[in-house]
Amino acid sequence: MTLTVELVEEIKVITLYNLASIQEGIKIHGSAKPELINAAARLFEKGLISQPDGGYLTDLGIEVAEHAQAVLQILSSE
């Protein structure tokens, strides 16, 4: 699997969520970069978030966010 620009943008959005509080959502405003707006829409279409502009993580979204944040933590450690 190739890591595309679109996938990187989706990872950026999914890692914005605070996993310490799944009741805390996010909002991607219309003034945000188009790449982030489009990434959020794709995550919604994939069933990972509750709204096309953010909202809350779905159950599947929580699982994906946990994995994505674990990968970033591992790769960022020295």
Image: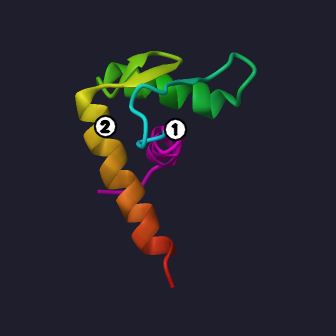
* Residue 43, quarter of picture: top left
Residue 25 percent location from the top left of the image: 49, 25
Residues shaded magenta: 1-17
The residue shown at (42%, 43%) is: 20
Q: Going by the picture, which residue comes out furthest to the bottom?
A: 78
Q: Nearer the viewer, residue 32 or 27?
A: 27
Magenta stretch holds residue 46: no
Q: Amino acid at mark 1?
A: Val
Residue for badge 1: 13
Q: Quadrant of the N terminus?
A: bottom left
The residue shown at (47%, 39%) is: 10
Residue 37 percent location from the top left of the image: 59, 25
* In the displayed structure image, the side of residue 59 where residue 72 appears, left or right: right
In the image, residue 47 above or below residue 20: above
Residue 62 disc label: 2
In the image, residue 52 above or below residue 72: above
Look at the image and name its color scheme: rainbow
Residue 16 percent location from the top left of the image: 54, 40
Cα distance between the residues tagged 2 and 1: 12 Å
Q: Amino acid at mark 2?
A: Ile
Dot 1: few (<14), some (14–19), or many (≥20) neighbours within 10 Å? many
* Residue 35, quarter of picture: top right
Query: Label 1's element?
Result: helix
